[in-house]
Image (tube, rainbow, N blue to C red):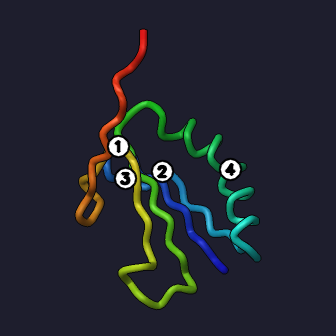
């Protein structure tokens, strides 16, 4: 399976990585490794991460987007966070 991970800040692409994964477990390990670098590049402002599963032919299943900037997302869903504890 091939996956492209893109990071956007202020609607501008900050990074793009295309990776090959041979299993779901491998995807988890690889994404975890890339997450530190990606988080550092996007930490200072609204952002969006897009994962494109290149082997998926259905455009409704091909993309997964999440982040704090919904302007580049299709039908974004807000996830309420629990109140912070002091």
Q: CA distance from mark 4 to mark 2?
A: 18 Å
User: Does 21 appear above or below 71?
Assistant: below
Left or right of 37, for residue 59: left
Find the distance from the CA under tag 1 to the CA under tag 4: 19 Å
The residue tagged with tag 3: helix, strand or loop? strand
Give the residue number, with chain letter if any, for mark 3: 12
Mark 4 or mark 2: name the one nearer the start of the chain: 2
Cα–Cα gap, marks 2 and 3: 6 Å
**Which residue in the structure is indicated by mark 1?**
68
Which comes sooner in the sequence, label 4 or label 3? 3
Residues under numbered marks 2 and 3 in contact, where contact means CB atoms less than 8 Å apart? yes
Instruction: Identify the element where label 2 is drawn.
Output: strand
Mark 3 and mark 1: Cα distance apart in space = 14 Å
Query: Disc 4 versus disc 3: distance between alpha carbons?
Result: 23 Å
Q: Is residue 26 left or right of residue 47?
A: right
* Residue 75 point in image, percent of width and height: 23, 64
The image quadrant where one finds the C terminus is top left
Q: Residue tagged by mark 4?
A: 32
Q: Residue at x 74, y 65 (%)?
A: 25
Q: Nearer the viewer, residue 53 or 8?
A: 53
From the viewer's perspective, is the residue at label 4 or at label 2 nearer? 4
Q: Earlier in the sequence, mark 1 or mark 4?
A: 4
31 or 19: nearer the viewer:
31
> Which numbered disc, 2 or 1, marks the residue that appears first in the sequence?
2
State the residue at coordinates (42%, 15%).
Answer: 85
Image point 32% across, 52% down: which residue? Answer: 11
Q: Which residue is tagged 2?
A: 14
Contact, CB < 8 Å: mark 4 with mark 3? Answer: no
């Amino acid at each position: 399976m091939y996956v492209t991970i893109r990071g956007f800040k202020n609607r501008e692409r900050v990074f793009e990585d295309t990776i090959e994964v041979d299993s779901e477990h491998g995807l988890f390990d690889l994404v975890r490794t890339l997450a530190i670098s990606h988080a550092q590049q996007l930490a200072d402002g609204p952002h969006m991460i897009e994962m494109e599963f290149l082997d998926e032919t259905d455009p409704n299943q091909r993309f997964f987007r999440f982040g704090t900037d919904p302007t580049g997302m299709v039908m974004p869903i807000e996830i309420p966070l629990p109140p912070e504890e002091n």
